[in-house]
């Protein structure tokens, strides 16, 4: 005789662990924190080394010059570069009113990055039995993204730029956490290899309902050949918002920011 | 997750959480009819997986701390990454016995501030005037502070 076992829902007393409620509460923390952020812009490309972080920093500075309140969330936990690109001091993070204060640049850009938390030169390593580290590493990184969104005192922002790592995984996590789909800025270099990687990332973004602002072609006029910017623009029906040369002057960024639209 | 006492056909109630060592997380459930207690034991990998979701089996007893999952799970964190706003510490903050202070000092600097705050909140909520290692043990178990 098989045992008489009822279903989860047939047991009518409360689930005291309430894991779904705990997850729901985590989502609400993100939504509450971002209620004062007018636009989240995910800086995306399928590929590493194309200048996502460089572009994020350039855009952040140009936005700050126009007087807008801007934040940079460095979501590249394994290769965080935002503090260096924004010339931020290595400061201790202050815990205040149940949140962590972001580090603020001399231009007023509010930034948070794993680089602020790690021992100098140390890679991001997690506790726990090492042999099965791959089992929860992804989960922990997703949790880190959630906490960077929810637990940093971003305050009132016109734009929160999210500097993503290569690939689409972190972007997928971001879109699942946000109450409203983010705007997307795609960064490519002119080459066909970069085009193909960015295409994959853009498809994933479009499929998930993100609003793609346009594509930024970086490292133009220096050794890389191809027309990735124009091709991606045509394919996705989006504008090329800027072509960034090596060591661009500030007005290149100013123009990019004008083309990005958004709150003023 | 729910536990069913098949013999009594009754839903079991969450009793307590324990960290008996070895990376094991134990959650005990009791049948309200026959009184039988069973414990769910997770292996270190499962314990860590639950921790990485930032959830607590048996439910949360105190509010989530800022960057709680990051602070409790990052191994390569800077000793002096965080500084707690001192204002919060003043007022009715519970005292720390010398032994409790010693034990707190052994917690890695990266999470020490958070652990201190959690223990202080725990003591305050329960009207405990002095934090001792015994209080820390109970709190650690009550709160499911894996590995702290
Ligand atoms: N237009 C540019 N002019 C000068 N240096 C650049 C430019 N774009 C990127 N770089 C540099 O190239 C390197 C890689 O860029 P980075 O922004 O870190 O790429 P990603 O974030 O996409 O991995 C960095 O050292 C960055 O400063
Ligand atoms: Mg980068």
Image: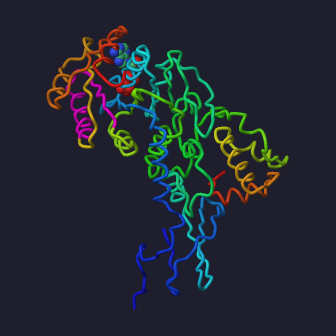
Q: How many marks?
A: 0
Point out residue A219 in the picture as x, y percentages from the top left corner. Answer: 29, 16
Image height of A6 relative to A225, above or below = below
Front one among A179 and B74: A179
* Residue at the image point whose x is 73% and y is 48% from the top: B120
The scheme the figure's colours follow is: rainbow
Task: Give me the residue at 51% from left, 37% from top.
Answer: A124
User: Where the C terminus of chain A falls, by quadrant?
Assistant: top left
Residue at coordinates 63% horizontally, 70% vertically from top-left? B15
In this picture, residue B43 sits left or right of residue B114: left
Which region is colored magenta? Answer: A182-206
Residue sticking out furthest to the right:
B98
- Residue B59: % across, % down: 56, 61
The magenta stretch spans residue A239: no
The structure residue drawn at horizontal position 64% and vertical position 61%, both measured from the top left corner, is B19
Query: Splitting the image into 4 quarters, where does residue A7 fall?
Result: bottom left
């Amino acid at each position: 005789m098989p045992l008489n076992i009822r279903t989860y829902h047939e047991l009518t007393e409360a689930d005291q662990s309430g894991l779904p409620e705990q997850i729901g509460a985590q989502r609400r923390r993100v939504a509450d924190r971002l209620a004062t952020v007018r636009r989240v812009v995910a800086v995306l490309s399928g590929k590493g080394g194309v200048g996502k972080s460089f572009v994020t920093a350039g855009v952040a500075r140009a936005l700050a010059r126009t007087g807008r309140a801007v934040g940079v969330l460095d979501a590249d936990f394994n290769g965080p570069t935002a503090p260096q690109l924004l010339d931020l001091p290595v400061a201790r993070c202050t815990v205040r009113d149940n949140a962590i204060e972001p580090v603020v640049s001399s231009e007023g850009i509010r930034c948070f990055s794993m680089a602020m938390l790690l021992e100098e030169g140390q890679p991001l390593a997690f506790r726990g039995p090492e042999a099965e580290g791959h089992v929860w590493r992804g989960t922990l990184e997703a949790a880190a993204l959630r906490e960077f969104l929810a637990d940093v005192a971003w305050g009132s922002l016109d734009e929160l730029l999210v500097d993503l790592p290569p690939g689409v995984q972190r972007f997928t996590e971001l879109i699942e956490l946000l109450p409203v789909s983010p705007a997307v800025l795609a960064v490519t270099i002119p080459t066909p290899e970069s085009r193909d990687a960015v295409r994959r990332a853009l498809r994933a973004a479009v499929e998930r309902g993100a609003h793609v602002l346009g594509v930024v072609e970086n490292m133009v006029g220096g050794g890389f050949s191809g027309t990735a910017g124009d091709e991606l623009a045509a394919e996705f029906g989006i504008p090329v918002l800027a072509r960034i040369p090596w060591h661009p002057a500030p007005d290149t960024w100013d123009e990019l920011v004008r083309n990005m639209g958004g709150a003023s | 997750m729910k536990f069913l006492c098949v013999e009594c056909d009754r839903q079991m109630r969450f009793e307590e959480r324990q960290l008996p060592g070895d990376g094991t997380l134990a959650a005990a459930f009791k049948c309200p009819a026959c009184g039988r207690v069973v414990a769910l034991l997770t292996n270190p990998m499962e314990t860590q997986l639950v921790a990485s979701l930032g959830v607590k089996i048996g439910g949360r007893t105190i509010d989530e701390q800022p960057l709680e999952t990051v602070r409790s799970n990052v191994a390569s964190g800077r000793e002096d990454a965080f500084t707690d706003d001192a204002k919060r510490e003043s007022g009715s903050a519970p005292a720390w016995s010398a032994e409790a202070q010693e034990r707190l000092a052994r917690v890695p600097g990266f999470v020490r501030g958070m652990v201190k705050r959690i223990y202080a909140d725990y003591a305050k909520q329960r009207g405990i005037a002095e934090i001792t290692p015994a209080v820390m043990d109970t709190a650690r178990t009550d709160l499911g502070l894996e590995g702290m």
